Amino acid sequence: MGMEWYDAIARRNGGYRSEAVYAIEGVSGEVVFEKELADMLSYADHVLDAGCGHGEFTLRMSTNARHIIGFDFSVEMIKIANQLLAASKVKNVQFVHATTKQPLPFTDEQFDLIYDRRGPTSILEHAHILRSGGTVFGIHSGSLDLVTRRLHENGFIDIEIREFNDAVCIYPSQVEFIRAMSDTPGHPDYSDPRHHGELQRLIAQHMDVEGKFVKQDYRFIWKAMKP
């Protein structure tokens, strides 16, 4: 999805979030990632959140960090992030509009830790902003081969990749399922009649015998060090 989709989600939902009601069963990679990141933040002086979205996660992580800069390529997301920052009492966070498709507005070896929570995997092409001995840490739901290739091509070492296949999202109704899918990158707004056929295929694929909707919550967590 391009920038237009993320800008539209920001305007519609007030950020990169969904109001869909669901429950997660099984070990969630997201929970593991957040816990491990919170531990890592206490050891880093300068942290970058690559693809921070509307900034809510960045602000939550700030309680564990000395200083975090979050950037995103969506102007609308950064607007919301700065509004949330202004409304908070957080003093150790800064939000910047930037894209990995251009030189980033950071200096060589500026950061001790770069984390990427379903953000641009192309951040790995900008290894020069991470200090020697610094860590990159991320979580994604796809593009495992691409992440692996970029880690190797950009000279990272001590590469660790863990997959989480067991967790599932359970949506109690078709309404909640449609809402969640419409707020997922790579999917259109399924309330639009033009996407009726594709929606029906999704419904048939994910509805169980009890009328609930079950979708695998696949994630992989990756970690590496700059030599």
Image (tube, grey):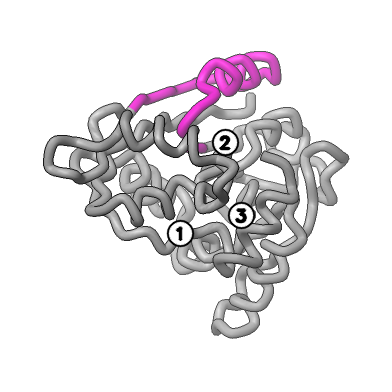
Q: Where is residue 18 drawn, in percent x and y?
A: 45, 59
At a point 70% along the width and 31% down the height, the residue shown is: 122
In the image shown, does 94 or 201 lie closer to the viewer?
201
Lower position in the chain sequence, tag 2 or tag 3: 3
On screen, residue 125 versus residue 158, left or right, reads right
What secondary structure is marked by label 3?
loop
Q: Is residue 216 visible?
A: no
What secondary structure is marked by label 2?
strand
Q: Is residue 37 visible?
A: yes
Mark number displayed over residue 136:
2
Residue highlighted by disc 3: 52
Q: Where is residue 50 drawn, in percent x and y?
A: 64, 47
Question: Between marks 2 and 1, how big is the CA–CA gap?
Answer: 27 Å
In the image shown, does 191 or 150 lie closer to the viewer?
191
User: Which range is magenta?
Assistant: 138-163
Lower position in the chain sequence, tag 1 or tag 3: 1
Q: Residues within 10 Å of mark 3 (few under 14, many from 20)?
A: many
What secondary structure is marked by label 1?
loop
Determine whether 25 is above or below 52 in the image: above
